[in-house]
Image: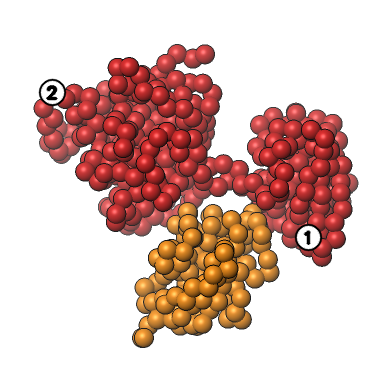
Amino acid sequence: MSQTIETDLLIIGAGPVGLFTVFEAGLIKLRCHLIDYLPQPGGQCTEIYPKKPIYDIPGFPSVLAGDLIHNLMEQIAPFKPGFTLGERAEEMRQTEDGKFEIITTSGTIHRASCVAIAAGLGVFEPRKPPIENLADFENKGVDYIIKEPEKFRNQRVVVAGGGDSALDWSIILADIAAEVVLVHRRSSFRGALDSAEKVTELAHAGKIKLVTEAEVTGLNGNGNLEEVVITFNNGETTTHSTDYYLPLFGLSPKLGPIANWGLNLDKNGIAVDTFDYSTNVPGIYAIGDINEYPGKLKLILCGFHEGTLMVQSVFKRIYPDAKLQFKYTTVNGVNGF
Amino acid sequence: MENTIQLTVIDRDGISHELVAPTDMNLNLMEVCKGSDLPVEGTCGGMALCASCHVYVLSDHELPEQSDDELDMLDQAFFVKDNSRLGCQLRMTEAFNGLKVQLAKV
C-alpha cells in the first residue's frame, strides 16, 4: 500500500477548472493535489475534443481545447501540483481532526483540509447495452474495458460496436483469440478508415467473423457466459457460443461514487452556496460543470470564477485567524513553491 | 406568433407535450426540450457526444443531413431506428413548424 498523500486542497477532477484552481490557490499559498480517472489531465478537453476550438475564453478569440489545457498546465507549474491519474475517487471519510480522507479505486489515500469537487460531467464509464441479464455476467465473460489482451488468448470472443474501439480491439484480438466475432448494427463501419479497411481485410482472411445488421440482445450461461443471442435487423435470431462478450460502445459520464458522499444533489449536480461554492458538508466544495445553483451556466469561464472565489473560503477554513490579503499578480508576479 | 414554431414532443411515458419554440434564438431541439423541463439531459452540451437527446422523428419534415459527429454518436447509442436523430443537431427554424418527435429510451 502506498503512503498517504497530504495536501491543503484536494481537487477531484483535473479538467480546466480543477487545473486553474491550483493557480488561484497557489497565489494564496495553498498547495493542491488532483485526482482524475482519466490517464492524463484536461478532462473532456483532452479526452473528447482536443482539436475543437473554444471561442469564449476571455482574451483568446479562439483556442483549441487541447492547447488550453497545455497552457493551464504551464500556468500552474510554479505551484507544483500533485496528480493521481487513472484512479477514481471512491470513498470519502472525515477524520477526527476535521480533515478529509479520499481513497481511490487503487487504494491510494489522500488526506486534505478541504476537498474541491471539479468533476465536470462525472466519471466516464463504459456505455452498457440494454441487455436484461448483462450485470449477471460482469467479470464472468462480460468485460467493458480491455486491460490485458492476453486474457483472451485462445478464447472465443464476441465484440459488439461499430466505433474505433470496437474495430481496434477486434484487430488486436484477431491475432490472440481463438475466434473473434464482430457484431454491428449497421452494414458499414464508421471508425477510422484504415481500421475499417483492416477489419474488412481480416474478415476476408477469415480471422474476424463479421456479423452486421445485427445486435447482441441476450446472454446465456450457467454462472459463466456460454453463448450470446444475436438478433438481426430483420427480426431473425440466432445464438453463438463464446467465452467472452465485449460490448464496446464508448464512454458516457456518470456522477459515480461521489453521489454516495452525503452531498445534497440538485438535478444532476451538487447543490452549492454561490457565496463560496460550498456544499452542505463544511470543507467540501463543488465547482465547474458538476455544481448546480440558480442561474448556473456550464461554462469553463464560470468555473474559473467559481474556483477563484472558493479558494478564499478554503483559506479561511484552514487559517481561521490569519488575515488574507488579496493581491494582483501584476503587482507581485507569480511566486511559486 | 412571429418567429416561433409549434412542436409536439412525446415523452418516455407516452405523454404528448405541445411546445412553442423561438426560431430567432439559434436554439436546437435539445435546448428547447430542456427549457421546457422535459427529461432531456443534454449532458455534453450539444456536441453530439452523449446521445442523451436521442429522439425519433415522427413527422415527415425534411431534416438537415446528419454530420459525421451525429452518425458516429448514433452508432454507439442504443434503441436506434431509421428515424433516430440527436435533438442537439436539429436547429429550430421555420421549416420545423409542426415537427413531431418522441424521446428515445436512455
Which residue lies under the disc numbered 1?
Answer: A213
Total numbered labels: 2
Left or right relative to B106: residue A219: right
From the top left corner, tell me how far across and down residue A248 is, in percent: 67, 45
Coloration of the structure image: by chain
Which residue lies under the disc numbered 2?
Answer: A321
Q: Chain of mark 2?
A: A
A316 up-or-down from B7: above or below: above
C-alpha separation, residue under disc 2 versus residue under disc 1: 68 Å
Within 10 Å of disc 2 (Cα), the crowding (few <14, some 14-19, many 20+) is few
Q: Tell me the quarter of the picture where residue A157 sits.
A: top right
In this rendering, does residue B66 appear at all?
no
In this rendering, does residue B6 appear at all?
yes
A240 up-or-down from A337: above or below: below
Quarter the C terminus of chain B occupies:
bottom right
Q: Are marks 2 and 1 on the same chain?
A: yes
Q: Secondary structure beneath disc 1?
A: loop
Front residue of this view, candidates A333 and B58? B58
Q: Amino acid at mark 1?
A: Glu
Within 10 Å of disc 1 (Cα), the crowding (few <14, some 14-19, many 20+) is some
Left or right relative to A240: residue A133: left
Q: Secondary structure beneath disc 2?
A: loop
Q: Tell me the quarter of the picture where residue A97 sits.
A: top left
From the top left corner, tell me how far across and down residue A203 is, in percent: 84, 50
Mark 2 or mark 1, earlier in chain: 1
Quarter the N terminus of chain B occupies:
bottom left
